Amino acid sequence: MERKPATTFEELIVWQKAHQFVLNLYKYTAAFPKEEVYVLTSQFRRAAISIAANIAEGFKKKGKKDKARFLNISQGSTEECRYYLILSKDLNYGENQTLVVQLSEVSKLLNAYSAAILNENGRQESEDRRQNIEDRKQESEDRW
């Protein structure tokens, strides 16, 4: 089954997963102590939003390098969120293993999407990567 290329960022599986991570993160951080509202809660939410927002912004960029730059910003924000998950767990702000798994999935999909965009070796490898992303999506949906 051949997938048609996405026409909007909302059709991208990687964006869908990143958006779901943001929604779940908001629920998780709502229980943080009040003194964290302008510190960890704010930073954590900003970084999570940045993942999905940069995927969306990069989607309409014309050149591969420009698209890759926005995806790279998303990757950086993914790692920032990874650290905040470690910190919030170490501060005993609640169980976050589900978020850890979701973020890991977003990270893998983002890496695959970036590689597919930067791929210079022709359409077949891109189609293979797209199929790999679709397979990962199906595995992820089975887990979630």
Image (cartoon, rainbow, N blue to C red):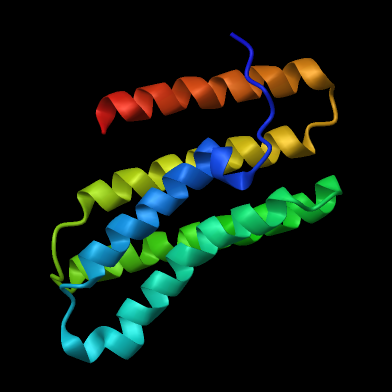
Q: Position of residue 38 (x, y in %)?
A: 33, 89
Q: Position of residue 59 (x, y in %)?
A: 70, 49
At 37% from the left and 80% from the top, the residue drawn is 42
Query: In the image, 110: left or right of 39?
Result: right
83 in relation to 119, above or below: below
Q: Residue at x 20, y 69 (%)?
A: 90
Q: Name the residue at the top extreme.
A: 1
Left or right, residue 5 beside residue 139: right
Image quarter in which the C terminus is found:
top left
Seen from the viewer's position, the closer of residues 46 and 4 is 4
Residue at (85%, 30%) from the top-left corner?
Answer: 120
Number of numbered discs visible in the structure rendering: 0
Residue name at image x 41 percent, y 63 percent: 81
Q: Would residue 96 be found to the left or right of residue 46 on screen?
A: left
Which quarter of the figure has residue 17? top left
Residue 50 image point, x, y percent: 53, 65
Q: Position of residue 66 (x, y in %)?
A: 81, 55
Q: Quadrant of the N terminus?
A: top right
Compared with 112, 16 (above or below) is below
